[in-house]
Image (tube, grey):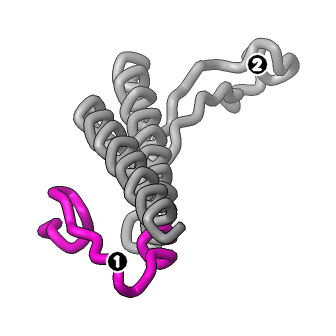
Protein backbone atom coordinates (compact mmCIF):
# COMPACT_ATOMS: atom_id res chain seq x y z
CA UNK A 1 0.00 0.00 0.00
CA UNK A 2 2.78 2.40 0.95
CA UNK A 3 4.63 1.71 -2.30
CA UNK A 4 1.50 2.50 -4.27
CA UNK A 5 1.08 5.84 -2.44
CA UNK A 6 4.76 6.69 -2.97
CA UNK A 7 4.47 5.81 -6.65
CA UNK A 8 1.35 7.96 -7.01
CA UNK A 9 3.07 10.90 -5.34
CA UNK A 10 6.13 10.56 -7.57
CA UNK A 11 3.82 10.51 -10.59
CA UNK A 12 1.99 13.62 -9.35
CA UNK A 13 5.32 15.40 -8.83
CA UNK A 14 6.45 14.37 -12.31
CA UNK A 15 3.25 15.84 -13.75
CA UNK A 16 3.82 19.06 -11.79
CA UNK A 17 7.38 19.31 -13.08
CA UNK A 18 6.22 18.76 -16.66
CA UNK A 19 3.47 21.37 -16.38
CA UNK A 20 5.86 23.84 -14.74
CA UNK A 21 8.45 23.31 -17.50
CA UNK A 22 5.78 24.02 -20.13
CA UNK A 23 4.83 27.25 -18.35
CA UNK A 24 8.51 28.29 -18.14
CA UNK A 25 8.86 27.71 -21.89
CA UNK A 26 5.85 29.97 -22.52
CA UNK A 27 7.57 32.78 -20.57
CA UNK A 28 10.10 33.08 -23.40
CA UNK A 29 7.29 34.06 -25.77
CA UNK A 30 6.35 37.18 -23.78
CA UNK A 31 7.61 40.38 -25.39
CA UNK A 32 8.08 43.82 -23.85
CA UNK A 33 5.73 44.62 -20.99
CA UNK A 34 4.21 47.84 -19.74
CA UNK A 35 2.48 48.53 -16.45
CA UNK A 36 -0.70 50.51 -16.29
CA UNK A 37 -3.62 50.83 -18.64
CA UNK A 38 -4.35 52.32 -22.03
CA UNK A 39 -7.65 54.08 -22.69
CA UNK A 40 -9.18 55.58 -25.80
CA UNK A 41 -10.90 58.92 -25.21
CA UNK A 42 -13.19 61.15 -27.23
CA UNK A 43 -13.41 64.74 -25.97
CA UNK A 44 -15.03 68.09 -26.70
CA UNK A 45 -12.56 70.81 -27.59
CA UNK A 46 -14.24 73.53 -25.52
CA UNK A 47 -14.92 75.96 -28.37
CA UNK A 48 -18.55 77.12 -28.13
CA UNK A 49 -19.09 77.22 -31.92
CA UNK A 50 -17.63 73.78 -32.62
CA UNK A 51 -20.04 70.97 -33.52
CA UNK A 52 -18.74 68.98 -30.56
CA UNK A 53 -20.20 71.52 -28.12
CA UNK A 54 -23.77 70.46 -28.87
CA UNK A 55 -23.41 66.91 -30.19
CA UNK A 56 -21.55 64.26 -28.21
CA UNK A 57 -21.35 62.09 -31.34
CA UNK A 58 -19.07 64.75 -32.86
CA UNK A 59 -16.49 64.88 -30.07
CA UNK A 60 -12.87 64.88 -31.19
CA UNK A 61 -10.66 61.82 -31.04
CA UNK A 62 -9.74 59.18 -30.52
CA UNK A 63 -7.03 60.29 -28.10
CA UNK A 64 -5.01 57.56 -26.45
CA UNK A 65 -3.91 57.86 -22.85
CA UNK A 66 -1.48 55.59 -21.04
CA UNK A 67 -1.66 55.71 -17.22
CA UNK A 68 0.52 54.00 -14.62
CA UNK A 69 1.66 54.40 -11.02
CA UNK A 70 5.03 55.91 -10.26
CA UNK A 71 6.13 56.43 -6.63
CA UNK A 72 2.51 56.11 -5.52
CA UNK A 73 1.18 58.72 -7.96
CA UNK A 74 -0.76 58.20 -11.16
CA UNK A 75 1.12 59.36 -14.25
CA UNK A 76 -0.67 59.77 -17.58
CA UNK A 77 0.65 60.46 -21.07
CA UNK A 78 -1.12 60.98 -24.36
CA UNK A 79 0.12 58.73 -27.13
CA UNK A 80 0.12 58.94 -30.90
CA UNK A 81 -2.13 56.26 -32.48
CA UNK A 82 0.88 54.26 -33.73
CA UNK A 83 2.39 54.27 -30.23
CA UNK A 84 -0.95 53.31 -28.72
CA UNK A 85 -0.98 50.17 -30.86
CA UNK A 86 2.47 49.25 -29.57
CA UNK A 87 1.64 49.97 -25.91
CA UNK A 88 -1.66 48.08 -26.16
CA UNK A 89 0.37 44.98 -27.05
CA UNK A 90 2.82 45.63 -24.20
CA UNK A 91 -0.02 45.95 -21.68
CA UNK A 92 -1.52 42.70 -23.03
CA UNK A 93 1.92 41.05 -22.70
CA UNK A 94 2.07 42.11 -19.03
CA UNK A 95 -1.37 40.64 -18.40
CA UNK A 96 -0.31 37.40 -20.10
CA UNK A 97 2.88 37.31 -17.99
CA UNK A 98 0.89 37.78 -14.79
CA UNK A 99 -1.47 34.96 -15.79
CA UNK A 100 1.50 32.65 -16.46
CA UNK A 101 3.07 33.50 -13.10
CA UNK A 102 -0.23 32.83 -11.35
CA UNK A 103 -0.42 29.40 -13.02
CA UNK A 104 3.18 28.71 -11.96
CA UNK A 105 2.20 29.53 -8.37
CA UNK A 106 -0.74 27.12 -8.61
CA UNK A 107 1.45 24.30 -9.93
CA UNK A 108 4.05 25.00 -7.23
CA UNK A 109 1.37 24.85 -4.52
CA UNK A 110 0.14 21.55 -5.94
CA UNK A 111 3.70 20.15 -5.92
CA UNK A 112 4.18 21.39 -2.35
CA UNK A 113 1.02 19.58 -1.24
CA UNK A 114 2.31 16.34 -2.78
CA UNK A 115 5.68 16.77 -1.07
CA UNK A 116 4.13 17.58 2.29
CA UNK A 117 1.78 14.62 2.04
CA UNK A 118 4.71 12.29 1.39
CA UNK A 119 5.55 9.97 4.25
CA UNK A 120 8.42 11.30 6.42
CA UNK A 121 10.56 8.28 5.57
CA UNK A 122 10.13 8.89 1.84
CA UNK A 123 13.05 10.72 0.34
CA UNK A 124 12.10 12.93 -2.60
CA UNK A 125 15.05 14.05 -4.66
CA UNK A 126 15.13 17.56 -6.08
CA UNK A 127 15.26 17.99 -9.83
CA UNK A 128 16.63 20.93 -11.81
CA UNK A 129 14.16 23.78 -11.51
CA UNK A 130 12.80 22.69 -8.11
CA UNK A 131 12.78 25.25 -5.33
CA UNK A 132 15.72 23.67 -3.52
CA UNK A 133 17.96 23.85 -6.59
CA UNK A 134 16.80 27.13 -8.11
CA UNK A 135 18.95 30.23 -7.84
CA UNK A 136 17.84 33.84 -7.75
Q: Is residue 18 above or below residue 11?
A: above
The residue that appears at 28% across and 76% down in the rendered structure is 123
The residue that appears at 12% across and 68% down in the rendered structure is 135
- Residue that extends furthest to the right in the rendered view of this protein: 54
User: What's drawn in magenta, residue-wise?
Assistant: 113-136
> Horizontally, is 132 left or right of 106 in the view?
left
Look at the image and tell me whether residue 75 can be seen. no
Q: Is residue 103 above or below residue 92?
A: below
Q: Which element is circle 1 on? A: loop
> Horizontally, is 100 left or right of 136 in the view?
right
Q: Quadrant of the C terminus?
A: bottom left
The residue that appears at 51% across and 57% down in the rendered structure is 106
The kind of secondary structure the magenta stretch mainly shows is: loop
Circle 2 is placed at which residue position?
52
Q: Nearer the viewer, residue 108 or 11?
A: 11
Look at the image and tell me whether residue 134 can be seen. yes
The residue that appears at 37% across and 34% down in the rendered structure is 90
Distance between the Cα atoms at labels 1 and 2? 74 Å
Residue 113 percent location from the top left of the image: 51, 70
Residue 96 percent location from the top left of the image: 45, 38
Amino acid sequence: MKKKVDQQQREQLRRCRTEYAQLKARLREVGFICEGSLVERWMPCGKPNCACASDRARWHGPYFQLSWKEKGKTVSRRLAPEHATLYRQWVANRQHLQALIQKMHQVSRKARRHLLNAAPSTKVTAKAGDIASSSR
